[in-house]
Image (cartoon, rainbow, N blue to C red):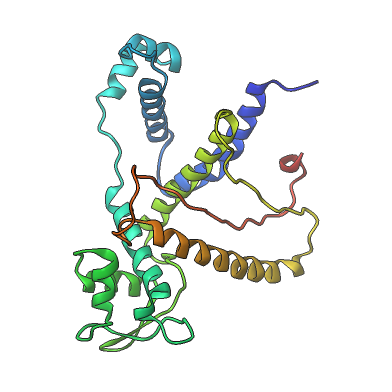
């Protein structure tokens, strides 16, 4: 018997929610809190994206679209908007600093590798790197953050070394949870675009997957996929940096857009129910 679109979507939603709920329960987020957040997003999308052209969206229409009572819609509209701007700024500036260290010739050797930097006091110091790629943020605050997360290593009191080729926070749980929201939202947004925006070109969305691999093959595939993905991302990072007006103020053109490519690795024991 062929399943309906709603049944397929319900099964997809259940699959998406399972790992998310695992994170929520480990972090002490109750169902009540999750339900309020879900209601807020239902109301926000219904209010701002499902209105009738030329007419102000009413509480009654939002209620009909979402299935929430008018009283609940009004309550949700009165809640404070959830914001994560501070973590977004921290993540962006850390990524820009590391990217600049990897591709700016002023901070690389003749072979194109990041060099050891003086913390301050020289034209090509870490202080100058932060000034160039992170604006007026105090360079010592950025250095402390990158050292704490394992991205940068102190060689001496006034020498630092780039330890990772990308910003991957190891110890800061708030940054890891921030990345959860950003990266997952980008992926789902791309899938939604490919499902519903028939008048626009599809966005790239692919994966490679085999389901009968031995345990012994996984370590080598982890290494191979990490190296290949990092090489591709660094190539794309160089192209994007030439067109980003924060990094290259001479870049012209109109509008302001966010664009990029995300790559992720997945691995789990074979589950016949999940794969079917």
- Residue 227 spot, x, y in % from top left: 60, 70
Picture quarter containing residue 167?
A: bottom left
Looking at the picture, does residue 196 appear above or below residue 30?
above
Q: Residue at x 64, y 71 (%)?
A: 223
- Residue 267 spot, x, y in % from top left: 66, 57
Please tell me which residue lies in front, 81 or 236. 236
Q: Quadrant of the N terminus?
A: top right
Q: Residue at x 54, y 38 (%)?
A: 17
**Residue 110 can be seen in this image:** yes
- Residue 13 spot, x, y in % from top left: 58, 33
Q: Residue furthest bottom?
A: 156
227 relative position to 126: left or right: right
Q: Residue furthest top?
A: 60
Picture quarter containing residue 12?
A: top right
Tally of numbered tags: 0
Q: Quadrant of the C terminus?
A: top right
Picture quarter containing residue 148?
A: bottom left
70 relative position to 228: left or right: left
**Residue 151 can be seen in this image:** no
268 relative position to 141: left or right: right
Q: Residue at x 48, y 44 (%)?
A: 186
């Amino acid at each position: 018997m062929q399943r309906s679109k709603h049944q397929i979507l319900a099964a997809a939603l259940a699959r998406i929610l399972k790992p998310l709920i695992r994170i929520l329960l480990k972090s002490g987020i109750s169902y009540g809190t999750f339900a309020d957040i879900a209601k807020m997003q239902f109301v926000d999308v219904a209010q701002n994206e499902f209105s009738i052209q030329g007419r102000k969206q009413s509480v009654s229409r939002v209620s009909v679209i979402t299935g929430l009572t008018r009283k609940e819609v009004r309550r949700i509209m009165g809640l404070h908007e959830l914001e994560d701007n501070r973590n977004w700024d921290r993540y962006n500036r850390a990524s820009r600093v590391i990217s600049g260290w990897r591709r700016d010739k002023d901070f690389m050797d003749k072979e194109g590798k990041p060099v050891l930097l003086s913390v301050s006091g020289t034209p090509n110091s870490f202080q100058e790197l932060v000034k160039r790629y992170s604006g007026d943020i105090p360079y010592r605050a950025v250095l402390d953050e990158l050292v704490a997360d394992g991205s940068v290593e102190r060689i001496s009191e006034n020498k630092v070394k780039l330890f990772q080729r990308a910003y991957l926070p190891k110890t800061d749980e708030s940054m890891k949870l921030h990345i959860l929201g950003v990266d997952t939202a980008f992926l789902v947004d791309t899938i939604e675009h490919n499902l519903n925006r028939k008048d626009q070109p599809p966005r790239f969305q692919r994966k490679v997957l085999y389901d009968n691999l031995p345990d012994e093959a996984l370590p080598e595939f982890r290494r191979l996929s990490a190296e290949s993905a990092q090489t591709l991302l660094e190539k794309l990072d160089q192209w994007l940096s030439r067109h980003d007006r924060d990094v290259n103020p001479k870049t012209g053109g109109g509008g302001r857009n966010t664009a990029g490519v995300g790559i992720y690795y997945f691995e789990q024991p074979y589950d016949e129910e999940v794969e079917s």
